[in-house]
Image: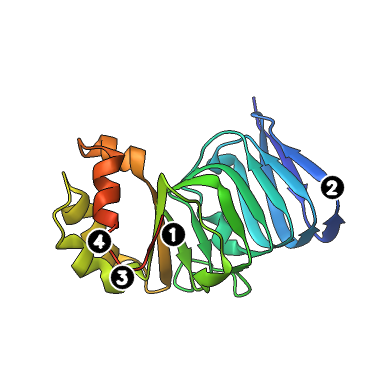
Amino acid sequence: MLAKKVFYEDREIENERLELTDKGSIYFLGRNLTLKNCTLVLKVSARRLFIEGVRFINCTFEVKQELKNHQDWVFASLEGCRFKGRFSGCDFGRWPTYPGAWEHAAIKDCDFSEARLDGCRFHGCDPATLRFPRWPCFTILDPIRRSAALAAMDWPGDIGSITMKGHAREPPSTVAVTWFAPVLAKENGTTPEVIKALLEKCEGVIY
């Protein structure tokens, strides 16, 4: 059965609640679309959600199932938005070297305090304008410059040699990376408390 294609484009939508939850649909948000003061309820996988050239202003995103490896946020301008739910491997902001990156992509004044982020990166923005989730999430600011110092610390498992050292290979536009400590701990045979104790010795970390 072919998926139903749902398009939102060439218009401005204000003060509406959009339910993007039908598993049999593919949602396309783009091409001269502006959403203001809207609530978007998302319950589809990344491969069923396409965002390109959209301006989101003071919108709320309620993610009802974990959104994994969704890079389409870099094709959006996000201003004053709030994010709720679980995100992993997602990228936000202005990433100029990403294929087809939108010239107006941006993120500022957004609130992730009610979200769970894991392996999510922020590009080409001022992280001081963003509210990051607190512990058990933690955010590394300026991860490229700090990668060598972080990798040199006595992390358990592969956190130092792979996770922290890996920040040196991030795109140059990367200004912050957020991780979820329980997942990182489980993957490396340790506990969130051990990770937190090491983070307390680091500069430029929000937790």
For marks 3 and 4, give the one nearer the viewer.
4
- Picture residue at 31% right of the left edge, 70% below the top: 144
Q: Which mark is residue 201?
A: 4
Task: Identify the residue under disc 1.
Answer: 121
Number of other residues with Cα within 10 Å of mark 2, as a class: few under 14, some 14 to 19, many 20 or more: few
Indicate the quadrant where residue 176 lies: bottom left
Nearer-N-terminus badge (3/4): 3
Q: Amino acid at mark 1?
A: Arg
> Residue 91, image x and y in percent?
48, 57
Is any atom of residue 175 visible in this view?
yes
Task: Identify the residue under disc 2.
Answer: 16
Q: Secondary structure at mark 3?
A: helix
Nearer-N-terminus badge (2/3): 2
- Picture residue at 44% right of the left edge, 59% below the top: 121
Q: Amino acid at mark 3?
A: Ile
- Picture residue at 66% right of the left edge, 42% below the top: 62
- Labels 3 & 1 near each other (Cβ < 8 A): no
Q: Amino acid at mark 2?
A: Glu
In which quadrant of the rendered image does the C terminus lie?
Answer: bottom left
> Residue 168, image x and y in percent?
26, 68
Q: Which mark is residue 144?
A: 3
- Separation of residues labelled 3 and 4 (CA atoms): 18 Å
Looking at the image, residue 156 lies above or below residue 206: above
Nearer-N-terminus badge (2/4): 2
Indicate the quadrant where residue 84 lies: top right
- Picture residue at 64% right of the left edge, 29% below the top: 23
